[in-house]
Amino acid sequence: MKATTASAPNAGPVDVHSPAAGAAALRTFFRIAEAWQLDNADQLALLGLRSRTTLATWRKGGEVSLSPDTLERLSYLFGIYKALQMLLPSPEAADAWIRKPNAGPLFNGASALDRLRAGKVADLYLVRQYLDAQRGGWG
């Protein structure tokens, strides 16, 4: 008997700039935002948005093309989330870490979320880099 494998139709590279990919990325972001208990102001800062209307539209779902800046921010946020899930003993501990005071030199007693509230991509990068270093590598 010969084994067969099912493959997705038109399987191939995913265009991260496609509206479908944007919708999937935003669904993931809003699940993380819920787990981290982010309010609208925090979500706006992390996404680099100024418009609550845009945030509300994105939250409703549907396909949307995202800017390179937003895609970069989401990539860092997904990496932060993944690193926390790997570093900490439970999903609850991982989700709580973002709000806990941190004595590390990057945070100076503030939480990671306090640092990220400035809305700078560089801060997302630094927190991601910090967590990757805690894990002992990149990726």
Image: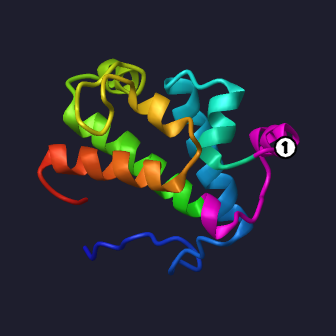
Q: Position of residue 66 (x, y in %)?
A: 70, 63
Q: Which residue is rendered at x = 22% and y = 32% of the image? A: 104
Figure check: 102 above or below 10 = above
Q: Which residue is rendered at x = 57% and y = 26% of the image? A: 34
Q: Which residue is rendered at x = 33% and y = 19% of the image? A: 101
Q: Is residue 83 left or right of residue 60?
A: left
Q: Quadrant of the N terminus?
A: bottom left
Q: Is residue 61 left or right of residue 48?
A: right
Give, as a three-letter code, the residue at label 1.
Thr
Q: Position of residue 35 (x, y in %)?
A: 50, 25
Q: Is residue 14 left or right of residue 80?
A: right
Q: Position of residue 91 (x, y in %)?
A: 33, 25
Residue with the mark numbered 1 = 57
Q: Is residue 97 left or right of residue 24?
A: left
Which quadrant would residue 5 be assigned to in this image? bottom left
SS for dot 1: helix
| In the foreground, 97 or 20 | 97
| In the foreground, 15 or 126 | 126
> Crowdedness of circle 1 by 10 Å Cα count: few (<14), some, many (20+)?
few
Identify the magenta region.
50-70
Q: Position of residue 48 (x, y in %)?
A: 66, 49
Q: Which residue is rendered at x = 45% and y = 49% of the image? A: 124
Q: Is residue 62 magenta?
A: yes
Figure check: 99 above or below 32 = above
Colour setup of the view: rainbow
The furthest residue to the right: 53
Which quadrant would residue 61 be assigned to in this image? top right
